[in-house]
Amino acid sequence: MKVNEVPQDGRQAIGDTTMINYAVNENGKIVPVQSSGWDVQILAVHNLADTYEEWAAEAKERVRNNQSSPIEYFMYHYGLDLPTLAQQMGLSQRKVKKHMKPEVFEKLDDEILGQYAGLFQIDVSEIKNFKKGLA
């Protein structure tokens, strides 16, 4: 697709975000082009966001029922999956999954919780006290 053919349907995908598409410029080089998206692309993004919201709600119930830790909820709430969260934390997926067990989560030190909080851009206290807010 050429730069002038990149769809600009004028709708935003989520909030005030713009999308980047790659197109061929007049010199034949592939370049990034900002786009407000097109209907199919926007629908796909909204469906994905809805799916993560649903997963977050389910995770919140598991936290409430002491079947999971707040880390699982925040992972989905911020649109991450296990492989991405593990990669961003510099940990194995197995280790992150272990942190999602309530009995392991309770023993995590502030350094590890601080890393999660930094990634989620929230305070450590929000992670620590999340379950209390569900009662």
Image: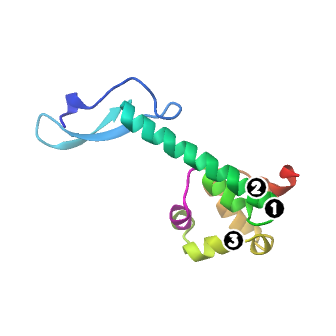
- Total residue callouts: 3
- Residue 80 spot, x, y in % from top left: 55, 55
Q: Is 119 placed left or right of 35 in the picture? A: right
Q: Residue at x 19, y 44 (%)?
A: 30
Q: Residue at position x 79%, y 74% from top?
A: 103
Secondary structure of the residue carrying numbered label 1 = loop
Between marks 2 and 1, how big is the CA–CA gap? Answer: 6 Å
Foreground disc of the pair 2, 3: 2
User: On the picture, is 51 further left or further right than 7?
Assistant: right
Q: Amino acid at mark 2?
A: Glu
Magenta stretch, residue numbers: 79-86
The image's colour scheme reads: rainbow
| Mark 2–mark 3 distance (CA, rounded to whole Å) | 17 Å
Q: Secondary structure at mark 3?
A: helix
Q: Nearer the viewer, residue 128 or 101?
A: 101
* Depth order, front residue of 43/26: 43
Residue 48, x across and y down, in percent:
50, 46
Query: Which dot marks residue 65?
Result: 1
Could you tell me residue 83's position as x and y percent? 51, 66
The percent position of residue 36, horizontal first and vertical second, equals: 38, 29
Rendered image: mark on residue 6? none
Q: Is residue 72 left or right of residue 10?
A: right
Name the residue at the top extreme. 10
Query: Circle 3 is placed at which residue position?
Result: 99
Query: Quarter-wise, where is residue 71 in the image?
Result: bottom right
Is disc 2 in contact with disc 1, using a CB cutoff of under 8 Å? yes
The CA distance from mark 3 to mark 1 is 16 Å
- Up-down: is 118 above or below 19? below
> Which dot, 3 or 1, sits closer to the camera?
1
Q: Which residue is mark 2?
A: 61
Q: Residues within 10 Å of mark 1 (few under 14, many from 20)?
A: few
